[in-house]
């Protein structure tokens, strides 16, 4: 079993008392992300099957008490795994790639093989979006455009509410992103996020995908709500009218109305 971390001080304490030649694996995850749920199962299977191979730490990247840890290790997307010895990063594994995770454990520990049960293996859901070449190695522009659109559709639907911003909620990199994070926190909205500064392909592609040229961008169930100005107006309207229904109900009406207007044009 892995150790569930509650704050960065716990990580520091564990690393300080761990022998220099002992492998430590950090698993950064978010509860809302399906790829994280899959990889958490794989991670726990490895920890259970090979408890002596490493010290296994699980860290909720969305928990504010872990914000300093996510900043320290530059976590911009989940699932995200870090392999350390003597507090030095040996390798990073980003995304839902169980084969790569297993090979990294084998590479950096004394374990020769890790035979995971078949039901514990999982493919990287973004692999199709990341591979822009055909079998002969020649990927055309049309293939690339199709692949990035597949990836963007997955990203905007990764959580019921998704925020594409500059930086992270713990460390916004622009004033507009900081204001929108504050609005969502004030409303106690649970949301996923993506740091567009860490991936220029997503940053440029999403502008075309949603026909919206600026950031931050907020999505609800895969549909664009808008940027800071629209979200601010929307929340201000709800605040002034004392709405009887949950915020999710009005978000559904809002994005539904936007889609209807697009169809009528």
Image (tube, rainbow, N blue to C red):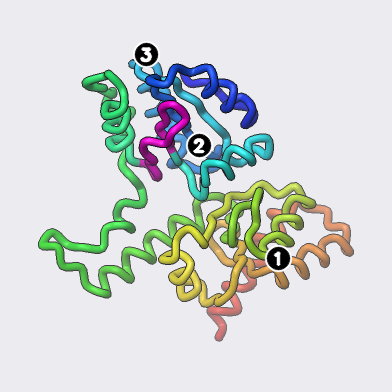
Which residue is drawn at the image coordinates 54% and 22% (left, top)?
Answer: 16
Q: Say few, some or many: other residues with alpha carbon within 10 Å of mark 1 (under 14 / 14 to 19 / 20 or more).
A: few
Q: Say few, some or many: other residues with alpha carbon within 10 Å of mark 3 (under 14 / 14 to 19 / 20 or more).
A: some
Q: Which of 53 and 49 lies nearest the eye of the viewer?
A: 53
Which residue is drawn at the image coordinates 52% and 77% (left, top)?
Answer: 211
Q: Say few, some or many: other residues with alpha carbon within 10 Å of mark 2 (under 14 / 14 to 19 / 20 or more).
A: many
Residue that badge 2 annotates: 28
Bounds of the magenta span?
81-96
Residue 93, percent across and down? 37, 41
Q: Is residue 238 visible?
A: yes
Image quadrant where residue 174 sits: bottom right
Secondary structure beneath dot 1 equals helix
Image quadrant where residue 32 sits: top right
By secondary structure, the bulk of the magenta-drawn segment is best described as strand
Residue 156, percent across and down? 51, 58
**Is 111 left or right of 30, judged from the image as shown?**
left
Residue 60, percent across and down? 57, 35
Residue 207, percent across and down? 50, 73
Relative vertical location of residue 247 with respect to residue 144 in this rendering, above or below: above
* Of the image marks 3 and 1, the number of the one nearer the N terminus: 3
Secondary structure beneath dot 3 equals loop
Q: How far is the residue under mark 3 from the one under mark 1?
A: 46 Å
Relative vertical location of residue 67 with respect to residue 87 in this rendering, above or below: below
Which residue is drawn at the image coordinates 31% and 41% (left, top)?
Answer: 123
Q: Which of 229 and 75 lies nearest the eye of the viewer?
A: 75
Mark seen at residue 175: 1
**Is 41 left or right of 124, judged from the image as shown?**
right
| Residue found farthest to the top | 52
Mark seen at residue 248: none
Residue that badge 3 annotates: 52
Residue 165 forms part of the magenta stretch: no
Secondary structure beneath dot 2 equals strand
């Amino acid at each position: 079993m892995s150790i569930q971390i509650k704050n960065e001080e716990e990580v520091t304490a564990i690393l300080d008392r761990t022998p220099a030649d002992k492998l430590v694996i950090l698993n950064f995850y978010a509860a809302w992300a399906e790829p994280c749920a899959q990889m958490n199962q794989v991670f726990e299977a490895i920890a259970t099957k090979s408890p002596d191979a490493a010290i296994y730490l699980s860290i909720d990247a969305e928990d504010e008490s872990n914000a300093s840890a996510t900043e320290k290790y530059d976590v911009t997307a989940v699932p995200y795994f870090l392999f350390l010895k003597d507090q030095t990063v040996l390798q990073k594994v980003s995304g839902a790639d169980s084969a790569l995770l297993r090979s990294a454990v084998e590479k950096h520990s004394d374990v020769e093989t890790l035979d995971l049960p078949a039901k514990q293996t999982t493919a990287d859901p973004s692999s199709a979006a990341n591979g822009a070449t055909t079998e002969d190695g020649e990927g055309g522009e049309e293939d690339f455009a199709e692949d990035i659109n597949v990836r963007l559709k997955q990203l905007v639907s990764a959580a019921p509410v998704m925020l594409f911003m500059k930086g992270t909620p713990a460390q916004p990199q622009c004033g507009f992103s900081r204001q929108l994070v504050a609005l969502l926190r004030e409303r106690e909205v649970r949301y996923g996020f993506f740091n567009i500064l860490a991936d220029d392909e997503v940053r440029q592609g999403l502008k075309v995908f949603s026909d919206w040229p600026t950031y931050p961008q907020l999505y609800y169930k895969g549909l664009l709500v808008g940027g800071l100005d629209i979200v601010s107006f929307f929340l201000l309207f709800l605040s002034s009218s004392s709405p009887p229904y949950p915020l999710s109900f009005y978000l559904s009406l809002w994005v539904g109305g936007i889609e209807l207007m697009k169809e009528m044009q």
